Image: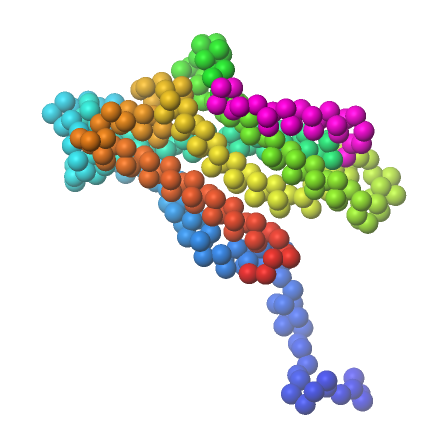
Amino acid sequence: MAGSTLASPSAEPVSGAAQTSAATSPGRETWKRFRRHKLAMASSFVLGTMILGVIVGPWLWPVPINEIDFSAQLQTPSLKHPFGTDDLGQDLLARMIYGGRISLAVGLAAMVVATFVGILIGAIAGMSRGYVDNFLMWVTDLFLSLPQLPLLLVIYFFREQLKAVFGVEGGVFILIVIVIGGLKWMPVARLVRAQFMSLREKEFVEAARAHGATKFRQMVHHILPNAIGPVIVAATIEVSSAIIAESTLSFLGLGFPPDIPTWGRLLFDAKDHLDSAPHWALFPGAAIFLTVLSINFIGDGLRDALDPRRVI
């Protein structure tokens, strides 16, 4: 414009292309902040490698998980058996790959159940006032106060019925997912309730309410998208918690049947051979440790990336 001057002698006008590149989308900004978390990036690589391994592993290592070879009992890791063998001569690498599919699937499925129930109860409680909110929080506190391990024993009361309907593996899988997910939703519910109670008084929600938006529309279209960041972080932590719960059940002999080699079941079978075959317990234990540790670091990275107030 005629007569305009620069703010300083060294200042230069900003072109339109530079202005466009400076404005980044929220998703790109979140990814940029997540990449700065070195442990989260390294954990993502480790977890992705493990997931890819259990998916494509059967094609790369097509050894039957139940192939018994008594001449190869309790062999240490070798080229023929990279993870060694168990007391029946079964290849531990093949059983680790198969068990990883089940353990990771249980963790993800239980997380979906816990997150769905937690969001549903937390959203209703956060949008309600009076006795509805008080009752739902009373139920949440009741579940939080109950000891979880004894409640997990209810698996034995229903496993036979589900086995008859969905088969041995499918019935136990559904039962374990429902039980673990049904005992992990409480932290998500309390978090969602706190987010909803804070956001429901914001100006954009008041504007939507003034335009005649129903409570359901306020919840789904206005409040929940703005509360999803902490929920994603909580859901990530629930995956590791569910994997630990399934491994605990299998280690106690309460999970999948003995012929289904989950990581926890492999640890249970290896406990009597720790002196003669430590590799039998080392590999499934390391897999559980790396998976849980990676998921926790990814959760830390997501927490930092989704919080615009945190400086990385």
Report whether residue 119 is seen.
no
Q: Is residue 27 above or below residue 73?
A: below
Which residue is more in the foreground, 89 or 146?
Answer: 146
Find out whether residue 143 is within the magenta segment: yes
The image quarter containing residue 290 is top left
Residues 67 and 157: in front is 157
Residue at the limit of the structure toward the left, as seen here: 71
Q: What residue is at 38 percent from the left and 37 percent from the top?
A: 288
Can residue 167 be seen at all in this image of the molecule? yes
> Quick check: 220 above or below 251?
below
> Is residue 178 shown left or right of residue 261?
right
What percent of the width, then of the height, locates residue 212? 87, 39
Residue 197: x %, y % from top left: 75, 40
Taking the image as shown, residue 34 lies to the left or right of residue 73, namely: right
Give residue 191's position: percent from left, percent from top.
Answer: 65, 39
Dominant secondary-structure state across the stretch colored magenta: helix
**Residue 195 occupies which quadrant of the picture?**
top right
Quadrant in which the N terminus is drawn:
bottom right
| Residue positioned 58% across, 42% down in the render | 232
Q: Is residue 116 above or below residue 70?
A: below
Verify whether residue 156 appears in magenta.
no
Left or right position of 103 against 110:
left
Q: Residue at x 11, y 25 (%)?
A: 71
Q: Quadrant of the C terminus?
A: bottom right
Dividing the picture into quadrants, the one containing residue 263 is: top left
Q: Position of residue 89 (x, y in %)?
A: 18, 26
How is colour applied across the structure in the image? rainbow
The stretch of residues the image draws in magenta is: 127-151
How many numbered marks have been drawn onto this rendered protein structure?
A: 0
The residue that appears at 48% across and 31% down in the rendered structure is 242
Above or below, 8 relative to 91: below
